[in-house]
Amino acid sequence: LMEVEARFSQEKQGLEAKSWQVGRSKVFLKEDLQGRLEQAVQEAVKSYVVLLQRSWRGFVQRRRFRKIRKAARVVQATLLTAQASKDFRALRRRNLSALMLQKWWRMIPLRVR
């Protein structure tokens, strides 16, 4: 209670004199002080809940982002593989065409004889 009293005085919400008293097994509070304490507890709980929600949502979004990034890499790899395969087939077709032209050029002088 001393800490709460110090905090309230820092916030310019000083406590009135004799607003609380310690008994043998209980602490007795005036209604005004009890309400302010309950409000302070609610605000503290709310801030912890917001912190917990923010942490959880951040964790979920980071996990989601990692999954999306991994999927994007798989798609990119697949597209690069498909493009490389297409380029290879085109190059192979071009090489086979060049071989056919060379073959025909070599064959022409033999047929002319």
Image (tube, rainbow, N blue to C red):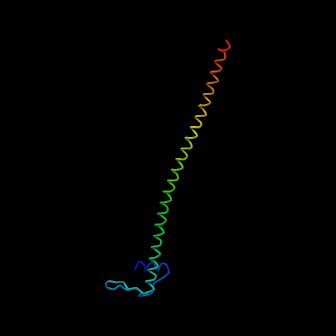
Front in this rendered view, residue 27 or 3: 27
Q: Residue at x 50, y 57 (%)?
A: 64
Looking at this rendering, what residue extends furthest in the front direction? 111
Q: Residue at x 49, y 65 (%)?
A: 54
Front in this rendered view, residue 83 or 31: 83
- Residue 91 position, x and y percent, is 60, 32
Q: How many marks?
A: 0
Residue 39 located left or right of residue 87: left
Where's the N terminus, which quadrant?
bottom left
| Image height of 12 relative to 66, above or below | below
- Residue 33 position, x and y percent, is 44, 84
| Image height of 50 relative to 94, above or below | below
Which of the 4 image quarters holds residue 24?
Answer: bottom left
- Residue 28 position, x and y percent, is 38, 86
Where's the C terminus, which quadrant?
top right
Looking at this rendering, what residue extends furthest in the left direction? 24
Which of the 4 image quarters holds residue 78?
Answer: top right
| Image height of 106 relative to 84, above or below | above
Residue 5 located left or right of residue 87: left
Looking at this rendering, what residue extends furthest in the right direction? 112
Q: Residue at x 62, y 30 (%)?
A: 94
Residue 100 located left or right of residue 6: right
